[in-house]
Amino acid sequence: MKHAACVILLFMLIFAGNASAQEVLPGLTVKNFSGKIIVSWQNEYTKPVSNIIIQRSYDSLKNYTSIGSVLNPQNKENGYADANPPYTKMYYRVSITFEGGTYVISPPVRPIKIIPVVDSSKLNTSKFPWQVSAYTDSVYQKPPNTSVPSQPFPVSVVNDSTKSIPNPVTIPTPPPVKKNEITYPSQRIYTAKDNTVVIHLPDAATKKYTAKFYDDADNFLFELTKLHEEYLMLEKVNFTHAGWFRFELFEDGKLIEKNKFQVGKDTKNGNK
């Protein structure tokens, strides 16, 4: 019972902070939070839904096993927490049954891994309980004479080792990066439609990249030092407010780009 309560609490906390980014059925949002897989969605069907069963498989096409169902399939926002998956890169889907017996199988989705890199000893865990971690080696430590806000920024990096971006985030494809050419918006660090900040480094596996981020008043925010994936995503919560932000991108310690991006405001109907 205690374990079940922990799983429910974990889901409620994560779900409450990410509802606006959920896919609409039959689409799914699937995220890996420190080995716990959260499958969530929004239900906009006008036809009554009688049952939703969550399934997982090592294979995207077959051998699916049902692992649970939701108590209230009619809820507009819903989800399921897989606390002990045998493998964190399994495929997840749901079987949606409507009143009358018809059903729909959702497309399979693999989890996007959320890697927290905040200083857990200083972070207010009541605000970001699922982001606390010991992954502090990628967080910039304040040097002498550098202005850093007294409260650290909760930096969450989304990492997909398959080098593709599955649902729920659709990443616009920027033009090819030409050597020594700097344009705005940046072709390497830019904002997606949902205000997620995308880092796109096609040769990250063979290069050593570092990125520093500043607010519009040139106050230092944070630094990411281990950029080894082609695509990374920074959730907008890292920047605490809407507005303009600046970055500096280094390759092997050499500055290769200084540019800016804008994080938009939230609205009641979604992100704009």
Image (cartoon, rainbow, N blue to C red):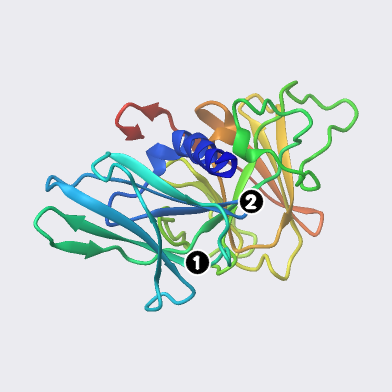
Q: Position of residue 231 (x, y in %)?
A: 57, 59
Looking at this rendering, what residue extends furthest in the top direction?
150
Badge 2 is on which residue?
34
Q: Is residue 184 visible?
A: no
Of the residues tagged 2 and 1, which is closer to the observer?
2
Between 133 and 201, the residue placed more toward the observer is: 133
Dot 2 alpha-carbon crowd within 10 angstroms: few under 14, some 14 to 19, many 20 or more: some
Q: Position of residue 37 (x, y in %)?
A: 52, 54
Write the residue at 71% across / 26% down: 219
Q: State the CA–CA distance, disc 2 to disc 1.
A: 20 Å
The vertical placement of 46 against 13, above or below, is below
Asked which quadrant contains residue 265, the reply is top left
Write the residue at 61% across / 55% down: 35
Between 91 and 145, the residue placed more toward the observer is: 91
Q: Is residue 59 visible?
A: yes
Dot 1 alpha-carbon crowd within 10 angstroms: few under 14, some 14 to 19, many 20 or more: few
The vertical placement of 218 against 117, above or below, is above
Q: Position of residue 163 (x, y in %)?
A: 55, 68
Badge 1 is on which residue?
164
- The local secondary structure at tag 1 comes to loop
- The reply, left or right, for residue 224 in relation to residue 142 is left
- The local secondary structure at tag 2 comes to loop
